[in-house]
Amino acid sequence: MSDAAPIEVGAEALVCPITADFLPDNMKKHVDPKAPVPLRMMAAKALVPLQPADMLAVLYMLSFDADAGVREQVMKTAGSLQDRVAASGFRDEEVQPQVLGWFLRIYAAHPAYAEMLILNSNTPDDAIAAVAENCSQKLAELIGQNQLRLLRTDDIIRHLAKNPNAAGALIDGVCDFAVRSGLMLEDVPQMLEARVRLFGPQAATQPPPQEGPTADQIMQEFSMPDPTGGAEESITPMEEGKKLTLSKRIMQMNVSEKIKLATKGNKEARGILIRDSNKLVSVAVIRSPRITDGEVLSQAQSKTCIDDVLRVIYSNREWLRKYAIKLALVKNPKVPQGVSMRLINTLHEHDVKSLAKDKNVPGSVQMLAKKQMDKKNAPKRDDK
């Protein structure tokens, strides 16, 4: 039982931003607004058989329920989750971002659960920023260590810098890193102090140098659609000349703005940024909410893809459900042997047979494929 005090987050406009598509058909009735209140109340009390991740999402959906009694019960249940549900669900990177952000607001004062949510890469940056100003020293350190988040969302640094529990050395380190990466927040005094530390006393009176275009400027200049948080649909590819100009403009950007563009930009921008020499930029691309399965497959097949990007791909259960991506990872020599060995056991027989003959795949993969085929083709002997 948790000792977290529920925060009344309400049911803003009573419109839930996620749907019940993730639920088994026989469970959707428990979140259906047209279903009888007792059915919905069962789910609000966590009395329906669901996996931890699904239970978290159901509680989130019911926090928007039209019935005040259901919403009140949801808050009681959400604030006192069983450990088996919280510990598993809060670590699950396939839980919807809105759900994780909602629970972080509820469990911000619970050290163990808040830590799980902060470490979950699918937890929204704005939820992290919201707790950064008043969280404990330990949680502040965890937030400050995530360099990708720091450069992706300015408000995290703004709130962290105001946190009275955060160690001065942590804030100095965060601001130094941000300034080196080209980020400058005029409304954060510690950022100005960092500029002085890094560039000398004159930096206190001189404006920071212009270090290339911003992500917003690039998106406007190249008519990129506003980000919607979803993967891009098929669109007309950018003309080669325009793409070359885009590449030159991106080269002029600092690291901070590249990360923002990697998160918000279009497919052409991501295609350029995935090859950036800074691994934070490449990882920002693969973690973009707009990334498509085709782009992920391309990186899974790439022999030059950096280890950090591959790690994100083979750690994502949703992508591993795409057979082409899974097969590409098995064939890629940069994927760790242990991962390849685990995935090969899930491949179709004709692909395993092909791998056993393929001299372009890692030797360990070819050997395991041969063993699997030999075992399958070995004559069965009856025990005497």
Image: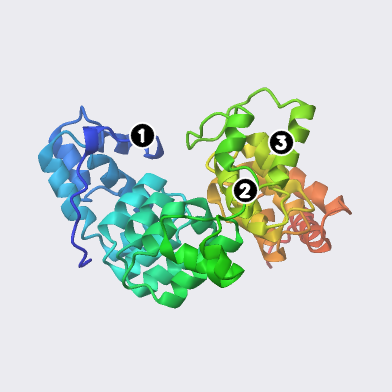
Seen in the picture, residue 214 relative to 161 is either above or below; the reply is above
Task: Measure the C-alpha gap from mark 3 to mark 2.
Answer: 12 Å
Please report whichever mark, 3 or 2, sits nearer to the chain's N-terminal start: 3
Measuring from the top left, give residue 7's x and y in whole percent: 20, 54
Work out whether mark 3 precedes mark 1 in sequence or the reverse, and give the earlier one: 1
Are the residues tagged 3 and 1 within 8 Å (C-beta)? Answer: no
Hey, what amino acid is under mark 2?
Lys
* Left or right: where 184 falls relative to 382: left
Name the front one of labels 2 and 1. Answer: 2
Quarter placement of the N terminus? bottom left
Counting from the top left corner in percent of width and height, residue 239 is at 75, 25
Q: Residue at x 25, y 32 (%)?
A: 32
Secondary structure at badge 3 equals helix
Say which residue appears at 25% left-offset and 59% top-offset. 81
- Dot 2 and dot 1 residues touching (CB under 8 Å): no
Q: Which residue is mark 2?
A: 258
Residue toward you, 372 or 258: 258
* Location of the C terminus (image quadrant): bottom right
Badge number at residue 246: 3
Task: Categorize mark 1 by other alpha carbons within 10 Å: few (<14), some (14-19), many (20+).
Answer: few
Disc sitting over residue 19 in the figure:
1
**Where in the figure is residue 19, as x and y percent of width and height?**
36, 34
Q: Percent from the top left, x then y, of residue 100?
A: 37, 52
Q: Camera-side residue: 280 or 244?
A: 244
Q: Please indicate, yes or no, whether residue 348 appears anywhere in the rendered image.
A: no
Q: Amino acid at mark 3?
A: Leu
Q: Is residue 324 above or below residue 259?
A: above
